[in-house]
Image (tube, rainbow, N blue to C red):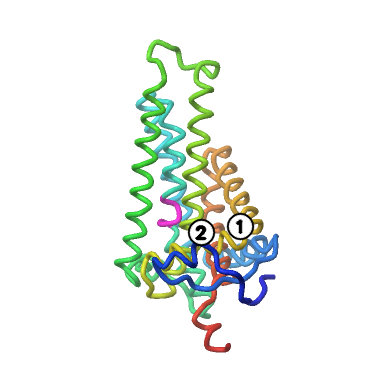
Amino acid sequence: MSEKIEPAAENAIEQSGIARVIPCKQLDKFDCFNWIALAVTDFKNAKLISFFYGAIFTILPLSIYFLVYATEWHLVIFPAMICFMLIGPFLAAGLYDVAWQFEKKNKPSLRHSLKAMSRNAVNEWGFGLLLMILMIFWLRVASLIHALYPEYLEFTFANAWPFLVLGTIVGAGFTILVFFISAFTQPILLERKVDLMTAVLTSMNAVWRNKVPMFIWACVIMFSVFLGFVTFFAAFLVIMPIIGYASWHGYIATIETKRERKFV
């Protein structure tokens, strides 16, 4: 279980002066599995809403697949996968709302969850725009990598592997950056009316101060995405709602909330 917030030496993120950073707790290595257990309970208690969001997360990669199949542009697969991972946190807002309603002992509803983006609209849509800019930037980088591939070569693994390796390295860098930025940003913006930079810096600081637990959580997410792809996206119907709920519970376990300050 995560420990109480204790004073610690400030790092560059907290000293940046760009925005305030909400304190975070020190997590145990395997706290994320407790978040998943709570998320499974949320899924069972809100099956219809969970399947609705799960269907959205299933349809999106299926659409990407059929786009690739129709255009026969195989090199679009990897950047499309990264795009899917980039916009995932933004689309999960409704799932965070469902978990939040359960936490408040309320009965969640689809309508209420769909309105989640309106609570802190300017900053929440700003976050979406930030993810979109990162996605567009990645697509431009991916297109440059694709441009390096000689047109006269047949697309085979032997010919393409250097470009796939380069794309994997660059894509991993983007994925790490997005994980730092988005791990807790959306839940913060949902629960608290703070500015976008406060939420982003708080998320980055929490990940930085809990490197090992958050690395394990990132591996769980990556494995879940991998499992979804190897099942031809069918597993996303269940996996993505559970990951969304678990992310909310991770936020509650990691970031100081307004409720905790009342009892300090």
Relative depth, front residue between 84 and 200: 200
The span from disc 2 to disc 1 (Cα, nearest Å) is 9 Å
Q: Position of residue 19 (x, y in %)?
A: 40, 69
Q: Quadrant of the C terminus?
A: bottom right
Figure quadrant of residue 115: bottom left
- Give the residue at the far bottom of this rendering: 263
Magenta stretch, main secondary structure class: helix
Relative depth, front residue between 3 and 107: 3
Q: Position of residue 196 (x, y in %)?
A: 37, 65
Q: Residue at x 41, y 57 (%)?
A: 90
Give the residue number, with chain letter if any, for mark 2: 183
State left or right for residue 98 relative to residue 254: left
Which of the two discs, 2 and 1, labels the residue nearer the N terminus?
2
Q: Position of residue 128 (x, y in %)?
A: 35, 56
Any mark on residue 56, and which?
none
Query: Would you say residue 229 is visible in this rendering?
Result: yes
State left or right for residue 220 relative to residue 115: right
Residues tagged 2 and 1 counted as in contact (Cβ below 8 A): yes
Describe the element under mark 2 as helix, strand or loop.
Answer: loop
Q: Quadrant of the N terminus?
A: bottom right
Does the stretch in magenta take in 171?
no
Q: Position of residue 111 (x, y in %)?
A: 37, 68
Give the residue number, with chain letter if any, for mark 1: 214
The amino acid at mark 1 is Met
**Residue range of the region highlighted in magenta in the rendering:** 87-91
- Give the residue at the far top of this rendering: 152
Q: Residue at x 50, y 20 (%)?
A: 160
Q: Dot 1: within a 10 Å radius of its alpha carbon, few (fewer than 14), some, or many (20 or more) residues?
A: many
Relative depth, front residue between 240 and 188: 188
Query: Would you say residue 47 is visible in this rendering?
Result: no
Describe the element under mark 1 as helix, strand or loop.
Answer: helix
